[in-house]
Image (cartoon, helix red, strand yellow):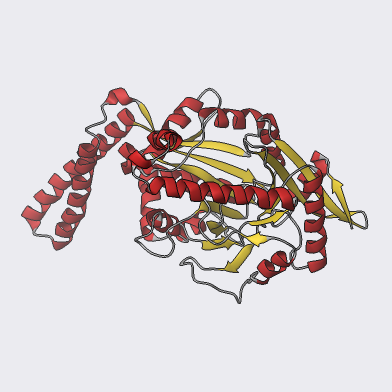
């Protein structure tokens, strides 16, 4: 086996066809990161002239010059072969050290243990727990199983293989989700992919939803650079929209039609006493009531609003997977089921364009309804799928002196800060007072 630096073309070919491939380990994201000035390197391992492993390393340095080499969602390789695993990670450690990094972080894109949609473990399906001990034997320390909001390690994924068409797809969802999808379609919610010209519409909706829901979103420039440096298929900044005047006119028209039908049915019941007609009256009355409620719900949106962007989500399409990276619904427009429309529309895109997995990505609150994020988890479950827990992050020192020295300093600084934080203000040194005030 031989460790090599890969060309863009060789890396792209390998990563696109690999079962562990992801948008993180993709050529599109590599181009984007380079455009942002990040130090990125593509590596591989060959055996007998054939590429058997590959990955992308991203180097970062903090303010004091401490350098990290990170292979997020990689390396891409056969983790069932201990010889390959040992060679790849040992070569990576040596290479990272030669680039003056102090530590190497890897996070294999494989499941820790198979789980169902409720999060219950199924080791009989897949069990990679022995990998943790194997990597620890190679000098890595596992970083734990807590929800990682930066390098996502808990997800909800729907497999699309074997689903023939849109009807079979929607019938695999629960009743509430199907109803929300059809209601949004009937009400005229439509999807639009943001361009550089319409980026402000996307970003305004995304940032509003982020501020309301409390999730972290990137600056506008980040999304602009994504559009400039990645393909239209890889980066899909999608918006769910509705034309308020058209929606109001449509509901009013349907209300008028059903009101006439209701009046006619009531007249016929009075004249004939028909039980069949009486039952029909109840159905039509429910429709009339529903349309009246709909008109009342949108009274706060005058026709001058025009077209409203009700939800915005960043999707990434790479290899065999379509990923919902981040996004949400603007609270004022939650009635229109914008996020549901976006999930459904992009699931159809995945089905029609050969993607075998639809990844809802970061999923939290799996263990119980009192946990943060449980509502989002329940929402995703409505579309069908399974909880996916990855093996997580592993860190190894490649320059032990700097690695352990840096951590010792951080630990001492943390202890000092804790002590200062417990002192009353009048007993703090001048520097301590300044920091607390800041």
Q: Residue furthest bottom?
A: 124
Does residue 244 show up?
yes
Q: Quadrant of the N terminus?
A: bottom right
Image spot of residue 337 (x, y percent): 37, 44
Q: Residue furthest left?
A: 270
- Number of numbered tags placed on the structure image: 0
Vertical order, 49 against 301 (above or below): below
Residue at position x 60%, y 37% in the image: 235
Image spot of residue 238 (x, y percent): 50, 37
Image spot of residue 164 (x, y percent): 58, 58
Q: Quadrant of the C terminus?
A: top left
Image spot of residue 170 (x, y percent): 47, 56
Residue at position x 48%, y 38% in the image: 217
Q: Is residue 173 left or right of residue 68?
A: left
Residue at position x 53%, y 52% in the image: 361
Q: Is residue 268 left or right of residue 18?
A: left
Does residue 257 show up?
no
Q: Is residue 260 left or right of residue 364?
A: left
153 or 197, which lies in front?
Answer: 153
Vertical order, 280 against 128 (above or below): above
Q: Is residue 275 left or right of residue 354?
A: left
């Amino acid at each position: 086996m031989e460790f090599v630096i890969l060309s863009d073309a060789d890396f792209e070919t390998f990563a696109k066809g690999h079962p562990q491939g992801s948008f993180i380990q993709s050529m599109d994201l590599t181009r984007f990161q380079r455009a942002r000035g990040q130090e990125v390197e593509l590596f591989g391992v060959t055996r007998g002239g054939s590429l058997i492993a590959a990955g992308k390393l991203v180097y970062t340095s903090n303010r004091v010059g401490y350098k990290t080499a990170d292979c997020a969602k990689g390396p891409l390789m056969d983790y069932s072969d201990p010889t390959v695993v040992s060679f790849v990670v040992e070569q990576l450690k040596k290479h990272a050290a030669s680039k003056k990094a102090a530590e190497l972080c890897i996070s294999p894109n494989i499941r820790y243990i198979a789980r169902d949609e409720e999060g219950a473990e199924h080791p009989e399906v897949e069990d990679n727990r022995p990998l943790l001990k194997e990597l620890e034997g190679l000098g890595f320390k596992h970083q734990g199983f807590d929800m990682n909001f930066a390098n996502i390690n808990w997800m909800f994924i729907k497999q699309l293989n074997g689903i023939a068409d849109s009807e079979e797809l929607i019938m695999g969802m629960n009743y509430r989700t199907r109803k929300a999808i059809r209601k949004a379609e009937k009400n005229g919610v439509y999807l639009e992919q943001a361009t550089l010209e319409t980026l402000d519409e996307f970003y305004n909706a995304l940032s509003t939803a982020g501020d309301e829901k409390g999730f972290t979103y990137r600056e506008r420039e980040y999304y602009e650079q994504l559009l400039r440096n990645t393909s239209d298929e890889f980066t899909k900044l999608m918006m769910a929209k509705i034309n308020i005047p058209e929606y109001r006119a449509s509901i009013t028209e349907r209300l008028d039609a059903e009101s006439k039908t209701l009046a006619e049915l009531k007249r016929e019941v009075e004249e004939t006493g028909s039980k069949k007609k009486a039952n029909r009256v109840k159905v039509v009355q429910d429709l009339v009531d529903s349309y009246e409620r709909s008109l009342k719900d949108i009274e706060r949106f005058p026709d001058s609003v025009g077209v409203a962007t009700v939800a915005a989500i960043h999707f990434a399409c790479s290899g065999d997977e379509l990923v919902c990276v981040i996004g949400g619904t603007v609270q004022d427009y939650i009635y229109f089921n914008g996020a549901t429309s976006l999930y459904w529309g992009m699931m159809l895109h995945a089905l029609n364009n050969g993607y075998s997995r639809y990844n809802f990505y970061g999923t939290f609150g799996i263990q119980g309804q009192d946990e943060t994020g449980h509502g989002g988890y329940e929402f995703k479950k409505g579309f069908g799928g399974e909880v996916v827990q990855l093996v997580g992050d592993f860190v190894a020192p490649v320059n032990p002196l700097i690695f352990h020295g840096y951590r010792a300093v951080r630990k001492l600084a943390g202890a000092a800060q804790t002590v200062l934080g417990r002192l009353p203000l009048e007993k703090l040194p001048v520097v301590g007072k300044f920091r607390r005030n800041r």
